[in-house]
Image (cartoon, rainbow, N blue to C red):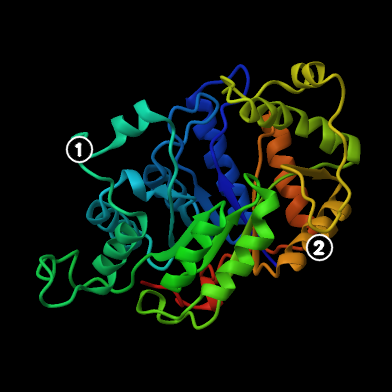
Amino acid sequence: MKISIVDTTPILAGTTAVEAFQLTLNLAGLADQLGYSRYWMAELHSAPSNASASPEIGIAAVAARTSNLRVGSGAVLVNHRSPYRLAETFVQLNAMFPDRIDLGLGRATRGPVIDFALQRSRRAAEADEPYEDKLVELLHWFDGFDDDHPFAQVPIFPGLAGRPQAWILGSTPGSAVVAGRLGLPYCFAAFLNPAAAHTALVTYRKEFRPSQFASGLQSPYTMLGVNVVCGETEEDALRAQAGGEVVWRLARTGRRPGAVPATVDAISQLGGLPKPYYYTPGRWPMCIAAAPDRLRDTLQAIADEVEADEVTVQDFIAEPGYRLTSYRLLAEAFGLRGNTEQKPASVNSGSATDT
C-alpha cells in the first residue's frame, strides 16, 4: 500500500515558525529517502500552532530538495482563491518540477474576520461563487474553455507539456459528491471526521463518472488521511501522542493552542498517557498511536474497511527527533523502499489525472 504524508508544519512548544519550517524540510528529505509516495503541504490560517499558510511556497521548497516524492497541496482553499491565479501557480510549479506536482483542492472557513480578510472582493452584497463552479473554472484553465467562453483566448504558459495532478480533499460526504461528479481522485480527511469516512467514500464511488478533467482515470481512486504516531513500544507511541491529544481536545472546545505542548506538559494536562486504540470496525479515533506492527495492521484494516487505495498520514508530535523517528518506523513497518531512479508514481501508476 502507498503511504504518503500531509504536513501542517506544526510549531512545537518552545520553538518558532522558522524551526517548524526547517523540521518540515528535514522530514520531507527523510520521506524522500524512505519511499513515501507524496508529501502534501496544508493551508491553515489564524492557526498559532501551525506555520503552513501558503502551501505553494512550501511545495516549491520541498520539491527543490527532493527527487522521488510527488509534492502538492493538502489542500489549497479554493473558496478563498482565484481559479486563474491557482492555475497559473500550479502550472508553473509543474513546469519547475515536471510530473511531480499534485494540486489538492478543498474549502474551509476560519470565521467571519479571517474569511473576509482572505477574499478578493469585499463587497458585502456580492454572493459567494459556488464551490463547484470555481472548481470547474479552475480545471478548465488546464483543459481549455469552449470557443465562446470569455477566457478561451487567455493562454497559460502555452507549449508546456503536462499539468498538475488534481485531487479533491474533504471531510464530509458533500466533498465526495463533488469529487465523483468531476471524476477526480478523492482524499478523505479521517483525522478531522472519522465517523463520516465510510459514508463519504461510498458516496464518492456512487457518484463517480469519468470526465474530461481526469481523462486517464476511468474508475474511482481514494486516499484516506489518518493522524498517526509510531513508537518503538506502545508506551513510546502513547507518550508521543500526548501533545496531539491536547491539541485535539482543545480544538473540540473551539480553543486554539499557541503550540503543540511538550510531552511532559501534555501528559500532565491529560492526567496520564492517552488510552490506546484497538481496531473496531466503524469506530476510529482522531489519532492512532501504536508500536510498528500493530500500527501497520490497524492502518491496513482501516484502509481495507473503506477500500482506500492509499493512506496519507499526519501528526502532532511534540518532540522533533521523535517526529522523524515515527515516520522512519512507519516506513519500516510497511516495507517502504526508497528509489532514486524511478519517477514518483501518480494515480494508476502513470499521469492518469494530468488535468
The image quadrant where one finds the N terminus is bottom right
The nearer-to-camera label among 2 and 1 is 1
Q: Is residue 150 visible?
A: yes
User: Residue 235: x, y in percent?
Assistant: 90, 35
User: Residue 6: x, y in percent?
Assistant: 57, 48
Report the side of 93 relative to 35 (left or right).
left
Q: Is residue 340 above or below residue 116?
A: below
Instruction: Name the residue located 33 percent from the left edge and 43 percent from the top edge.
Output: 80
Alpha-carbon span between mark 2 and mark 1: 49 Å
Question: In this figure, which residue is indicated by the disc labeled 1?
Answer: 125
The image quadrant where one finds the C terminus is bottom left
Disc 2 residue type (three-letter): Ala
Local secondary structure at mark 1? loop
Question: In this figure, which residue is indicated by the disc labeled 2?
Answer: 301
Q: Is residue 318 above or below residue 119?
A: above
Instruction: Name the residue located 69 percent from the left edge and 37 percent from the top edge.
Output: 323
The single residue placed furthest to the front in the displayed view is 125
